Image (cartoon, rainbow, N blue to C red):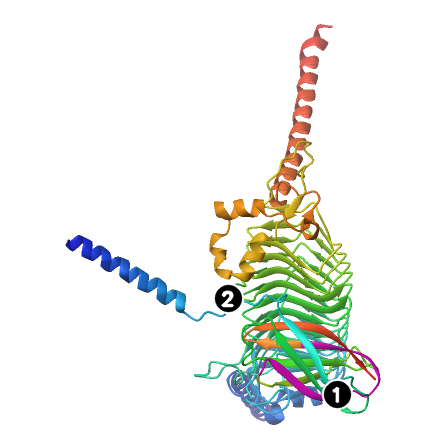
Amino acid sequence: MNTVKRYVTQGLAIVLLLGASCSAVAARSSATAAPSGPAGIQTMIDSAEDGDVLTIPAGIYEEQIIVDKSVWIVAEGEVTLIGNGEAPVLHVVADEAAIEGFRIEQASAGTDAPAVLVSADRAVLRALDIRTRASGILLRQANHSRLVGNTIRPFTGEGESTANGDRVYNGIDAYDSHDNLIEGNSIAYMNDGIYLESSDRNVVRRNHVDHSRYGIHGMFSEGIVVTENDGEANTTGAMVMGVEGAEVASNTFVKMNESVNSQGILLFEVNRSRIADNQVEGNRVGLYIELSSGNEFRNNRVIRNFVGIQLLESEHNRFEGNDAIGNVIDVEATDSLNNRLTRNYWDAYQGIDTDGDGAGNLRYAVNPFFRKLTSETPSYQLFFHSPGMLFLESMFAAGQSDWTFDDEPLMKPSSMREQEYARDGEGGAAFAAAAVMLAVSLLLLYYYGGRRKC
Amino acid sequence: MTRHRWGMFVLTAFAVLITACSSTQNPQSQDPAQAEFTLLTDPSPVAAGQQAKVAVAVSGIADTAGADVQLDIRELDDPRRPNYVTAAGQGDSTFAAAYTFRQAGSYTIYVHYYLQGLHLTKKKLLEVQ
């Protein structure tokens, strides 16, 4: 009996050992090989239920996936999904699906299929590393979704210099998709980094775009919010067109001077919007504004552009608290009346502040002489700020009624004003500390001196 | 004398260098305010339901060779929906496309002009009878 028991125990141990070995081999092979086909991700999705969490083992998966269930698909380790067909590599069609941590390669030449297509609501795409010959992520009638922390670059095969012939696609491209959050994504070498068309109330926040045409491009999208993004070496940092009630704030678009036509922020037919706290530096035009009215431009830093602010057929805009530093031409306004400029800093302003309110006593007149001269003969730009040019400019006073004026130009830029404010705060604290110390010392003197004698 | 000859050589080399740098074909910047797009139609005025030729004459841009022009013609019943029509170059800074306007009314047409990273947009209105 004991012998039988021993054989059974040994047999079970061998079976368990074999099972364990097989599992280990399977696990190892899934980390290195391509478990497409029956063991692929689509099979796992097909057998899942809504609400399931699917953990995908590390490996390379050559398949195109349709997520038609509300599942959360998470990469465990390095998961690479490669698509070579006419369809998107990953297509989300079910609401409330989430995909996280994948590397996705759209390697098909000659197709417009994106790496990822979302045509459902409340999707989450997080930490995807996308390499694509076409668009990175397309949103089509996809609402309330979140695209967070993804990286998008063109796919280039060995020895190839461009993604898909001469055509370059957009990184994130939304059409008829509303109320989405696009945050913390990094996009480079695409056509437009983030493109929104007819897509309302999307929030585009803390993204980085470089070496693309437009960093952020919003077209006919109401109430979009573009904040805290940064871009460099794009043709234009942000273009917003055909929009009411947008907010473009705290963005930084610098080093755009690789293109002779670069613009920091371009607004076309934008109305009743707020453009604030942005920094636009090193462009042909810092803020380009056309057919736009009723906007508020506040506390922007417009630095080292050829033209700081250019207005064309734009009226009733208000500029306040902005810094214009190192621009060749501060403001150029064509067919643009009734714009209000007040309490901005212009480094070209030469005036005095006798009453100490921080603003000059004389208004700042933007003399168009240099602009007119250089627009007719660009080589005269060589004489920028030369003594002779400044003298000629001072002599030119024709048509002053059409000039642009700042009623109360500030004497110091915002950075210096902030430092003074901080110093004022420090001074107040020091005064309070000194007062407390004085009071304590007086109390001590009274206690150890006068009071004991009584 | 030798020093004088060396001086002349250095000056000549410097002049050649400057000339070579100046003659490099750098792309010209384009002031968007200088660009003008004039909308032309054939027939004029355009009648609803009949195919028309819609053309854009470009001026204020030094060289339009190789430019791509798209007309975004907004339909009256769905003005938020983009409707891009490619206008082909006619060789005289004019770009044209055939289009049939379905209804009578005032159409908004956005002209998009692309050339080597330059993108200019102008808004035009067209009355269709």
Numbered mark located on residue B43 in the image: 1
Comparing B1 with A440, the one in front is B1
Tell which subunit mark 2 falls on: A
Does A81 appear above or below A314?
below
Element assignment for label 2: loop
| Amino acid type assigned to the residue bearing label 2 in the image | Glu
Q: Quadrant of the N terminus of chain A?
A: bottom right
| Amino acid type assigned to the residue bearing label 1 in the image | Pro
Q: What's the residue at 56%, 62% (across, down)? A: A284
Residue segment shown in magenta: B92-111
User: Picture coordinates of residue A308 (x, y %)?
Assistant: 60, 56
Does A449 appear above or below A40?
above
Tell me, yes or no, if residue A438 can be seen here: yes
Does A34 appear above or below A307?
below
- Does residue B96 belong to the magenta stretch? yes
Q: Residue furthest top?
A: A454
User: Picture coordinates of residue A283 (x, y %)?
Assistant: 56, 61
Q: Are marks 2 and 1 on the same chain?
A: no
Comparing A109 with B46, the one in front is B46
Name the residue carrying label 2: A258
Q: Nearer the viewer, mark 2 or mark 1?
A: 1
Q: Residue A110's image quarter?
A: bottom right
Q: Residue A101's image quarter?
A: bottom right
Tell me, yes or no, if residue A71 can be seen here: no
